[in-house]
Amino acid sequence: MRFVPAHLDIAATAIRAVLPLEYPADAILRRFFRENPTLGSNDRAFVAEAVFGILRHRFFLEQIVNLATPRSLLLAYLIKFQGINLRELTACISRTEEKWLAEIKAITLESQSLAIQAEFPEWLMEKLTHFMPDTDILDLGHSLQQPAPLDLRVNTLLTKRNEVLEALTQEGIQAQITPYSPSGIRIVGRPAINRHPLFQSGKIEVQDEGSQLLGYLLAPKRGEMVVDFCAGSGGKALLLGMLMNSKGRVYAFDVSEKRLHNLKPRLKRSTLSNLHPQLISHENDIKVKRLAGKIDRVLVDAPCSGLGTLRRNPDLKWRQSPKSIEEIKKKQMAILAAAGNLLKPGGRLVYATCSFLPEENQEIIESFLIQYPKFTLLNCTDLLSQQNIPLDTGELLQLSPALHHTDGFFAAAMTFT
């Protein structure tokens, strides 16, 4: 992080705009940058890193400052997590600020409670302690405090992974293949990939490796009828279409017109001809019901707490609650039931979330299998092995940023008889 004194005021203003967290932090920050168009790229980079850094370490920072204001949190963050020297700040801080900043330099993270070290709110700690030992909670917490890497998916209809890797390397971009996804590349740093010719020509897409693995778990074949039930802006639907070599049909269902609108340029770049975005009003929309019993494979990347994405969205810790998770669970069951109704005998259903809470994952699957006994659980490790992906997390897929360096995805695969 490159610091100049002028950054202090503008970053504190951005933090003040974000911290009520009435809306997603990234959306508030985008609006802030639109309202401050004179900020240069270095200014925006500093502000974004400071805002998300403070959100990642907010519990600890609030513990060590006397009064949690945007400015005090920012100064404490710079000293404790960015290695900024007090001498660099002397010209733009008061004597009082200089004194307490000198005092907090001696405070260690290890002297704090487990909740503060892990950066989890008490309600989440209470849930985690029911199924994780303290050491695992701490490992998970530490991993979620790190910024997520930039993962790409190569569109193998248009190019080969090694060709993309070679092109990026020649340009001085540090890149390597992902350890699990056969089409993934992991980038070091934050190059402007959306302006890169490989991106603009549809040869690469930005997609977390964990998200990519869901497509390989579903493993659609050429000529099949496939549904991405909660498609969003279509990252997984594009992968499914690619795996099918653009043969057959992929329906990309979503209730958000805006998200599906964002799929349009991605679909155009991809050159896929088998992907069909469909706006639905709810899981029992007539567009869904008319496909009952006709579909070979269904992917349900269900609405969830998103806690597995805290590396990217640290504000979710404050925007979710036990009450909101209870409401999400009802929606998850309703969507899974509607999605299961689409399958023909022998079809495959993959249920996934980006959460690590059993109540959104294993408990949903257990309840579903009791209510719908014609569905049988498949072994995710075996399914991935069939795709030459050596990843063993047991019968169910549970990815962890601490172990796998992906978002915290869960998945269960089932077949309908």
Image (cartoon, rainbow, N blue to C red):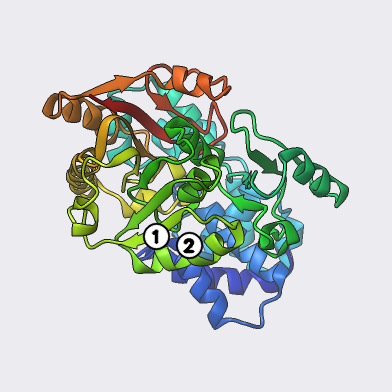
Q: Give, as a three-letter code, the residue at label 1.
A: Pro
Residue 155: image x %, image y %? 63, 47
Q: Give, as a three-letter code, the residue at label 2.
A: Leu
Q: Are the residues tagged 1 and 2 within 8 Å (C-beta)?
A: yes
Mark closer to the observer (1, 2): 1
Residue that numbered label 2 is attached to: 263
Residue 50 to residue 218: above or below: below
Residue 198: image x %, image y %? 72, 56
Asked whether residue 374 is in view, the answer is yes
At a point 26% along the width and 61% down the height, the residue shown is 280
At a point 35% along the width and 46% down the height, the residue shown is 227
Residue 189: image x %, image y %? 71, 49
In the image shown, does 59 or 414 lie closer to the viewer? 414
Residue that numbered label 1 is attached to: 277
- Residue occupying the far left of the picture: 371
Residue 58 to residue 33: above or below: above
